[in-house]
Amino acid sequence: MNLTKTAGIPALWTILSLILIAMNACNEPVCGYEEPCEERCELFEDFETDPVGPTTNWLTTAANASIQVQGGSNTLYLQDLSGGSSAYNTIEFPKNLLEAGCELHYSVQYLAGSSNATSAPNSINIFTGTSLATATTRAYFELNSGSAIVSGATPVTIEVPLELASGGALPSNAFGTWKLIGGSTVPTPADIAAFNTLIQNIDGVGFVVDNGGNPAEEWWYDDFCFWQCCK
């Protein structure tokens, strides 16, 4: 009798162990379980490691804009000159933006200069090709009136959605809407396909500096980061 009870204890322990192993064996996404997603913005570029002065990773269109990394807080500084002015980067940013995060955040400050608009809808461009000015395919994130950059204001953070176009519309959020250069006002299926291909295979990003007839606009950019785990 006692031997039977003693022999049953290891058997019972074995059964309990197997149950515990089964309960804890499936902790991978393929099993339907994922670790909690922590919302955060992974810093991509804040220019603190760049030397003060011209930076080779950001280029301008001919001599139509002045570009440098300014000291102090180390920000990317762009100043409009004559003609169509823009700056672009074909080196640093990942080709597939969807893999980098669900939003791109950056801070921006603007000074209009005389006779120019005191607010600007200018935001980031993505493109294929060797430069922003000669892009094969290009899309830009146009800020809405409530999010336009106000001249002389303190720096503000812009949040750009990184997602595929769907439902007959390009991605948008409270800050603005993606627009495809050369696309229709109401995006066609071809526009949707072109945007979805572009955002997953960019050659670079850039900013258009112009916002008026007087070539006096000044822009400051900083704190580029990719937001993770959008809710």
Image (cartoon, grey):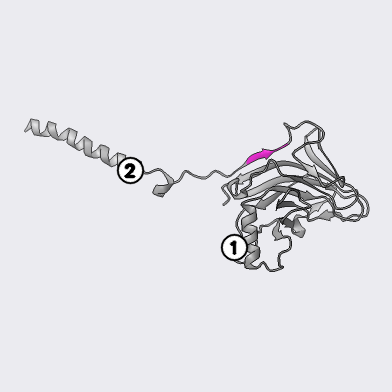
Type of amino acid at the residue the image marks with label 2 = Met
Assign a secondary structure to mark 2: helix
Depth check: give the residue in front, 53 or 217.
53
Which residue has dot 1 on it?
Answer: 166
Assign a secondary structure to mark 1: loop
Q: Is the magenta stretch mostly helix, strand or loop?
A: strand
Depth check: give the residue in front, 98 or 227.
98
The residue under the point 26% across, 37% down is 17
Residue most toward the left?
1
- Kindly identify which numbered label has been placed on residue 23: 2
Q: Tell me which corner region of the image, top left, top right, bottom left or bottom right, holds residue 221.
A: top right
Q: Is residue 84 left or right of residue 4?
A: right
The residue under the point 93% across, 51% down is 114
What is the x, y in percent for residue 214?
Answer: 92, 53
Residue 100, magenta (yes or no): no
Q: What stretch is highlighted in magenta?
A: 42-46
Precedes in sequence: disc 1 or disc 2: 2
Q: In which quarter of the image is the N terminus?
A: top left
The residue under the point 78% across, 54% down is 122
What is the x, y in percent for residue 10?
Answer: 18, 33
* Crowdedness near tag 1: few (<14), some (14–19) or many (≥20) residues, C-alpha within 10 Å: few
Depth check: give the residue in front, 118 or 134.
134
Residue 43, magenta (yes or no): yes
Q: Is residue 22 left or right of residue 175?
A: left
